Amino acid sequence: RDEEQQQPDHNNAMEDSMEISLGMAFLEATREKELPLEQQEEQALDFIETMLSLTLAVVNVPSGTAAMTDCGLIPALVSVFSASQPFYKNGHLDCQRKYIASQAVQILDAAIVAHTSAFTSFHELNGVDSLVKCLQDELEEIKQASGVGENAMEVEYQAQTRKLTASNRVILYNIVNCLTVVFHQQEASSHPSGGNHLRTPALTAAMKELLNNIDSYGGLLIALVSTLLSDIMNADPQVVHHVHDSGIAASFLAMLKGEKANVPPSAELFMAIPNVLAALSLTENGARIVCEHNPFPTLLTIFHDKEYAMPKSKCLLNDMTAIVGSGIDELMRHVPNSRLLATRALVDAVKAVVAEGKAV
């Protein structure tokens, strides 16, 4: 009897197993074939990019920023650019990955300005350190792609050309711009100042790398770096000593050395230069170094150099001479020793213009 009872149970189990196998076979036959890994990654990046675009639109509304911050937006954004970034052999995927990181930094920038809680959350997550690490990694990747040695960022001046893609420029610009915004916000808070961050080896090396290779990184980015430096020094004058001792000041002043300025044709950079010179002169020793370097003759050659004038460039339009002149005048007011140097440079510049006019 026991055998007769067990036989139907065994048959039922066999039937159930067969039905499951047939069901799984049906699912395998009807579902879409699994895409190659590269296509899966591309679809995932497309989805992330779309979501970040939507998030940026929401963050641009003040109430949207508050709601998104309460939902954990800031930790999510920080994780996007603080995690180790994979390198894709596919150039399209690598550019898309950089664009996504740039989107995250841009959204973070907007959220910090619009909502105080976002700024507090950003600092609790050590967001500045993550941004600086991302900047350092990006510069290191550019150096490797350009065939530059490992210790290039520590050398006073590197003549090798850096090979930058459009995606490199976008993410570098967004990171430096976000750092500028963050340090502005810190001035009115109890968080560590930008001077404390500038004293770190990572940010110091990054600033020197950018300023030592102006031709490669371009005038727009260097203008933003110059604005960042002047803002940090004006907010924390004690950091001026570090800027000079670490070589950042020497890297900046190198563009204003010689008979011709090593300055890309950028209106934004021209406007930033006098502000940086004034910030470098906030201390007595700093003012002495700037006066010894005497950047005024080289700076003023820009205004009678054909490379910066129409039709080759439009960078000197829109009252640029008045803007730069006001900056030099402000520097002369605060640094008496610079008055004679600047006045002589102005007279020599006028004489050069007259000589070029007579030669026509």
Image (tube, rainbow, N blue to C red):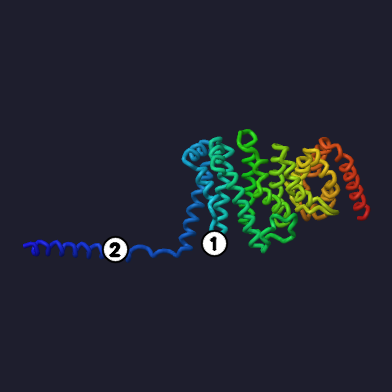
Q: Amino acid at mark 1?
A: Tyr
Q: Position of residue 16 (x, y in %)?
A: 20, 62
Q: Nearer the viewer, residue 313 or 194?
A: 194
Classify mark 2: helix, strand or loop: helix
Q: Is residue 220 visible?
A: no
Q: Name the residue nearer the viewer: 345 or 203.
A: 203
Say which amino acid is labelled 2: Met
Residue visible at 19% across and 65% down in the picture = 14
Q: Nearer the viewer, residue 48 or 7?
A: 7
Residue 229 can be seen in this image = yes
Q: Which residue is mark 2?
A: 24
Alpha carbon distance from label 1 to label 2:
35 Å
Q: Quadrant of the N terminus?
A: bottom left
Q: Is residue 351 above or below residue 124?
A: below
Q: Position of residue 28 (x, y in %)?
A: 32, 64
**Secondary element type, mark 1:** loop
Quickly name the residue at label 1. 88
Dot 1 alpha-carbon crowd within 10 angstroms: few under 14, some 14 to 19, many 20 or more: some
Nearest to N terminus: mark 1 or mark 2: 2
